[in-house]
Amino acid sequence: MTLVGRSAPNFTAMAVMPDNTVRDNFELAPFIADRMAVLFFYTMNFSYICPLELAELNTRIPELQKRKVQAIAIGVDSHLSHQWFKRLPQTNGGPGNVQFPIVSDMSGNICQGYGVLINESVPLRATFIIDRIGVVRHQSVNDFPLGRNMDEIIRIVDAQQHHEKTGEIIPPQWQPGKPALLATPESLMEFVRRAA
C-alpha cells in the first residue's frame, strides 16, 4: 500500500518529547503545521539496529531544523519504555537523549494506518516524508535487518523542497546545487547533453 500523493493520516497518541516529558495528546497535524515532516517508524526499543538508527537520525536534527522539517519517531513500545530507552546512552544500547518526539503506538493503529505493521505486532523500518500541506511525498520501507541511510532522507527532503521552490523535477543522483530539469523534452535533452 502506498500513501504517496495522499494526505498523511493524522493521529493523536502519547509521546515522549525531546525534554523527556510525556505529552498525552500529541497530534501530528498541529505539531507539523506548515512544516515538512519525517515520520520514522522503528521496530522496538532495546533491540539492535533501532537505537543506532535513532541516534543517527538525531545527528541530522540540526540539518532538518535548518530546512524547517520536524522529525517524529513512532514505535509500539509504551511511553514509559520510550522514556527509559532515551535515558540509555549509545554505549549501553540506547539511542541517547534524542531531540525529537517518540510516539507510543501500543495499539498498532498508527502503524496500521501507514501500512507498516507486521503480524499485528511490530512495524517495519519505514520512513515517510510529508510536505508542508500534509501530503506524503516519499515512502520507503525496509525489512527488519536493513538499517536506513539518513543522508538519503536529507537528500529527499532537499529534492522535495527544490521541486516546490522551482517546479523542476529531480533526476537520479541529484544533490543540492546540481542541475535539475523541467518536465519538457527540450529540458531533458539539454540535461543529457550537459551530463555527457
Image: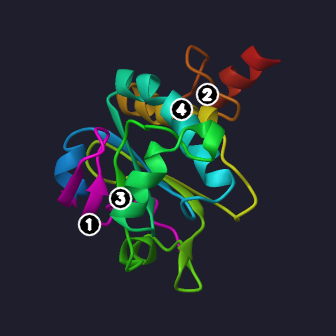
**Residue 152 part of the magenta segment:** no
Mark 4 or 3, closer to the camera: 3
Q: CA distance from mark 2 to mark 4?
A: 29 Å
Three-letter code for the amino acid on which mark 3 is drawn: Val
Mark 1 or 4, closer to the camera: 1
Residue 17 is situated, as x and y percent measured from the top left of the image, at 29, 46
Where does the magenta region start and end?
Answer: 1-26
Of marks 4 and 3, which one's residue comes earlier in the chain?
A: 3
Q: Are marks 1 and 4 in contact (CB under 8 Å)?
A: no
Q: At x 37% / y 78%, what residue is drawn?
A: 109
The answer to whether residue 135 is seen in the rendering is: yes
Residue toward you, 27 or 7: 27
Q: CA distance from mark 4 to mark 3?
A: 21 Å
Residue 126 is situated, as x and y percent measured from the top left of the image, at 56, 59
Q: CA distance from mark 2 to mark 1?
A: 44 Å
Identify residue for label 1: 11
| Dominant secondary structure of the residues highlighted in magenta in the image | loop
Mark 2 or 4, closer to the camera: 4
| Mark 4 residue element | helix
Three-letter code for the amino acid on which mark 4 is drawn: Ile
| Mark 2 residue element | helix
- Outermost bottom residue: 119
Q: CA distance from mark 3 to mark 1?
A: 10 Å
Identify residue for label 3: 103
Of marks 3 and 1, which one's residue comes earlier in the chain?
A: 1
Query: Is 128 left or right of 17, judged from the image as shown?
Result: right
Please rate how many residues cluster around mark 1, counting C-alpha atoms within 10 Å: few if below 14, some from 14 to 19, many from 20.
some
Residue 1 is situated, as x and y percent measured from the top left of the image, at 53, 74
